[in-house]
């Protein structure tokens, strides 16, 4: 009996030892090679390179074998030449720039980051550091006291991700749960916050990756992947906004979108035949609902085959898109990557001839089932595959289509289990599905964008469901197949805010919900919120009730029209904000964490959905059906948009709620350019720019921007841009000298001065008396219920001045 127990004990010990041996650490540093801006390191079990990418960004690479040639689908920036001090002792190596101090310990190898003054920003967890478990690699970071984590792209959960874990594996998740993970896209970039410091970490590894922010442990945060090397960029700046700017300097920034894509878009799954599409367009015009886009889902195709039209439903697509264009509508169509396997089908045969499809190791094309049936899939990680796609998408521009909506590009197939041994070119490196899966969508939208740009002189609108870090260079993204539920409406806000924190400015969600049928109150609230998100698309699924603005009754229609109208009057502000995103990467829809990083209240789940739309407008969204709600206004002075009432920030308050109004506040010292009402972006507004200026105690500047809204001429200097600065200390509003070769479309500027008492102003040194006017941002709602009082409209009383919009500097004194 004793012998038997002894045998079992030895067996168990051997099993434990074998398992323990699977965890491999780099060990001690054995050799160091200094370079101009970094070091190459050999350890007992690994190879590493620590490089100063710029003064505030350090790149860390670690692998069990010598580091492979550098390659990234996400990073497009090259290292900058900066002054770097490298010192070495028996215990450590120090890389010092003017912004960051990196300390590499030798026994064992580990990395820590400090401010120049020696304060800890981020450090490896002692005893864990970086290690491999089989082929999985992970880096473990010490959890700092009170540390918060935000970002990571399209992720459910709270704004503050502390205590949670996440997986990146692009997935087709129809009607997903509000806490489901993963979703459609992968952006392995997050921001850590503690002790009045913030930093960013971008883990550039395209295998399935996992992030742990203290989930199931109280010791560390970590990030790792199921294969490949440990490869991350550490970014430090004092301001969180600068971290986003630095991250987008690495991964690229969006191009200016066409102006029409910022207007209201009407969609459903699906509008057909062509007479139904025209009926929708005509009804939008008849009911004076401003709109710029109609989107066609998969039923426009012949049996769901790409690069075809259903000849019965759409007998003359060129005539249809031309008619829509004359009405002020642009057409966007859906595309999926799957090419139906059908002998004689033109696109299928061209793909076979050019051998552009992904393959098994034995050379046979991979076949998966999607909407058309069994399909092959172009290899977008091969230049040959992208070139083929660029030629194929000419089909759309030839048919008058202006937008390409890339769907099902996770890759989605029925069964959701693409074999891991499917092979991809990966731009000559060669990779299995395990490495290529998460970048497939990114490379598809790259090919779509480049193809659209090659085939037309107009800016293309590209939309995607899936992607990887850097997707903002090519496309807008929407949050997929959501549900017609209040919690999905609020989740969509958090998803878009998180995407904005992760470098993606052009985001949207299906207004009204894709699956199911919203209540009148939910639909109405969603349409109001939609007016303050970057991509404003109403979309619902097959076998649901109609979800056009007139489908929910007259009151809902008037409320929706009120907010769509406001969206169109705000286009000068919105377009200028998009221009800013092209310059610094900051999102259009901004989590309060960007401006109020260290205010703990903004991370409270009660207030985490509140966000800034641009720099001026604070949106406080609420679920439908609530009579009262709690808001938190950060420090400073805040005006209520509709009445001009002033609130002092820094505290919580309970406010009454009405389905007719969405709570919106304006930050003090804000500058908001607006225009007269238009029905679509091809219409010219009146010749006077309406410039709303809000009194405040802080200096503020706004960069106003115009171009033609459709071509690439702005890249050659054909734009109009000027900085407008409000300086309360100098008691002045100053229009800087206009830049660019284009003249403004506005001959005059009407100043609407909120919160100012003085009547007498000086314009270019001459005294001018301001007028007093009532300012309304919404129209009153009709009296539909005889038992209720007639509708009224809130107004703000302002001072007004009208000046000529001269191109030189204009100074206005108080």
Image (cartoon, grey):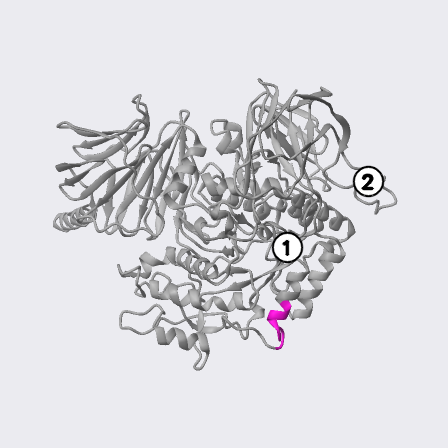
- Give the residue at mark 1: 292
Q: Which mark is residue 708?
A: none
Front residue of this view, candidates 573 and 408: 573
Left or right: residue 531 compared with residue 379: right
Q: CA distance from mark 2 to mark 1?
A: 29 Å
Give whichever of discs 2 and 1 has the lower sequence position: 1
Decide: is 367 above or below 169.
Answer: below
> Where residue 493 sits in the image (x, y, percent)?
55, 43
Within-10-Å neighbours for mark 1: few <14, some 14–19, many 20+: many
Is residue 443 shown in magenta?
no
> Where residue 645 sits in the image (x, y, percent)?
70, 26
Residue farthest along the bottom direction in this orientation: 344
Is residue 314 shown in magenta?
yes
Residue farthest along the top direction in this orientation: 729
Within-10-Å neighbours for mark 2: few <14, some 14–19, many 20+: few
| Residue at disc 2, secondary structure | loop
Visible residue check, residue 415 = no
Give the quadrant of residue 219.
Answer: top left
Instruction: Look at 61% across and 31% down and name the residue there.
Output: 671
Visible residue check, residue 423 = yes
Residue range (magenta): 312-320
In front: label 2 or label 1: 1
Decide: is 20 above or below 591.
Answer: below
Q: Which quadrant of the figure contains the C terminus?
A: top right
Q: Are marks 2 and 1 in contact (CB under 8 Å)?
A: no
Decide: is 675 above or below 394.
Answer: above
> Where residue 306 sits in the image (x, y, percent)?
49, 70
Instruction: Look at 36% across and 29% down and name the residue there.
Output: 144
- Give the residue at mark 2: 791
| Residue at disc 1, secondary structure | loop
> Where residue 408 sits in the image (x, y, percent)?
47, 62
């Amino acid at each position: 009996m004793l012998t038997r127990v002894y045998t079992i004990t030895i067996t168990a010990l051997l099993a434990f030892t074998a398992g323990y041996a699977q965890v491999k650490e780099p060990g001690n540093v054995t050799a160091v090679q200094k370079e101009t801006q970094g070091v190459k390191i050999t350890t007992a079990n690994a190879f590493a390179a620590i490089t100063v990418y710029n003064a505030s960004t350090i790149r860390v690479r670690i692998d069990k074998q010598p580091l492979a040639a550098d390659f990234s689908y996400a990073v497009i920036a090259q290292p900058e030449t900066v002054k770097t001090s490298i010192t070495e002792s028996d215990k450590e190596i120090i890389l010092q720039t003017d912004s960051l101090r990196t300390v590499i310990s030798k026994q064992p190898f580990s990395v820590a980051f400090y401010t120049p003054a020696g304060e800890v920003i981020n450090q490896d967890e002692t005893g864990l550091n970086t290690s491999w478990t089989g082929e999985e690699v992970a880096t473990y970071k010490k959890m700092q006291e009170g540390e918060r984590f935000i970002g990571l792209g399209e992720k459910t959960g709270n704004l503050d991700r502390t205590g949670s874990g996440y997986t990146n594996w692009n997935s087709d998740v129809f009607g997903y749960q509000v806490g489901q993970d993963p979703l459609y896209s992968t952006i392995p970039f997050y921001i850590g916050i503690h002790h009045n410091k913030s930093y960013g970490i971008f883990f550039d590894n395209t295998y399935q990756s996992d992030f742990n922010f203290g989930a199931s442990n109280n010791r560390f945060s970590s990030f790792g992947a199921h294969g490949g090397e440990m490869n991350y960029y550490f970014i430090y700046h004092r301001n969180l906004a600068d971290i986003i700017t630095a991250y987008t300097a690495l991964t690229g920034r969006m191009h200016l979108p066409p102006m029409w894509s910022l207007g209201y878009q009407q969609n459903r799954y699906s509008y057909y035949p062509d007479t139904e599409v025209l009926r929708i367009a005509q009804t939008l015009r008849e009911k004076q609902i401003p709109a710029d886009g109609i989107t066609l889902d998969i039923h426009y195709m012949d049996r769901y085959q790409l690069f075809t039209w259903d000849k019965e439903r759409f007998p003359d697509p060129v005539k249809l898109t031309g008619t829509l264009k004359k009405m002020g509508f642009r057409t966007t169509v859906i595309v999926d990557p799957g090419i139906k396997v059908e002998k004689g089908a033109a696109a299928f045969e061209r793909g076979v001839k050019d051998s552009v499809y992904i393959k098994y190791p034995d050379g046979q094309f991979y076949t998966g089932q999607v909407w058309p049936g069994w399909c092959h899939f172009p290899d977008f990680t091969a230049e040959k595959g992208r070139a083929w796609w660029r030629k194929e998408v000419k089909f759309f521009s030839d048919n008058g289509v202006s937008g390409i909506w890339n769907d099902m590009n996770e890759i989605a197939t029925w069964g959701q289990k693409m074999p891991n041994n499917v092979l991809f070119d990966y731009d000559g490196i060669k990779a299995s599905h395990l490495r290529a899966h998460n970048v497939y969508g990114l490379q598809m939208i790259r090919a779509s964008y480049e193809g659209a740009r090659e085939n037309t002189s107009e800016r293309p609108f590209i939309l995607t469901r899936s992607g990887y870090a850097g997707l903002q260079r090519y496309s807008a993204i929407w949050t997929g197949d959501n549900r017609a539920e209040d919690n999905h409406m609020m989740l969509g806000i958090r998803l878009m805010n998180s995407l904005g924190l992760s470098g993606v400015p052009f985001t949207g969600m299906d207004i009204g919900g894709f699956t199911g049928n919203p209540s009148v109150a939910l639909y109405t609230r969603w349409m109001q919120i939609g007016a303050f998100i970057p991509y404003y698309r109403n979309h619902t699924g097959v076998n649901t009730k109609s979800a056009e603005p007139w489908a929910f009754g007259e009151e809902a229609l008037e409320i929706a029209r009120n907010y769509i109208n406001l969206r169109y009057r705000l286009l000068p502000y919105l377009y200028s904000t998009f221009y800013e995103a092209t310059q610094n990467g900051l999102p259009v829809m901004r989590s309060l964490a960007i401006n109020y990083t260290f205010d703990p209240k903004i991370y409270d789940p009660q207030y985490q959905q509140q966000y800034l739309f641009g720099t001026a407008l604070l949106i406080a969204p609420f679920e439908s059906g609530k009579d009262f709600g709690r808001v938190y206004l950060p420090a400073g002075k805040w005006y209520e948009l509709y009445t001009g009432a002033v609130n002092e920030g820094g505290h919580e308050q309970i406010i009454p709620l009405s389905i007719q109004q969405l709570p919106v506040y304006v930050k003090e010292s804000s500058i908001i350019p607006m225009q007269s009402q238009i029905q679509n972006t091809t219409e010219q507004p009146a010749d006077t720019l309406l410039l709303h200026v809000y009194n405040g105690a802080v200096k503020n500047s706004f960069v106003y921007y115009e171009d033609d809204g459709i071509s690439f001429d702005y890249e050659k200097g054909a734009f109009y841009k000027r900085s407008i600065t409000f300086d309360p200390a100098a008691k002045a509003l100053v229009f800087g000298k206009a830049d660019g070769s284009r003249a403004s479309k506005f001959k005059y500027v009407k100043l609407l001065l909120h919160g100012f008492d003085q009547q007498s102003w000086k314009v270019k040194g001459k005294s001018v008396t301001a007028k007093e006017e009532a300012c309304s941002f919404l129209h009153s709602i009709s009296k539909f219920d005889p038992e209720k009082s007639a509708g009224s409209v809130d107004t703000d009383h302002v001072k007004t001045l009208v000046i000529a919009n001269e191109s030189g500097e204009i100074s206005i004194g108080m």
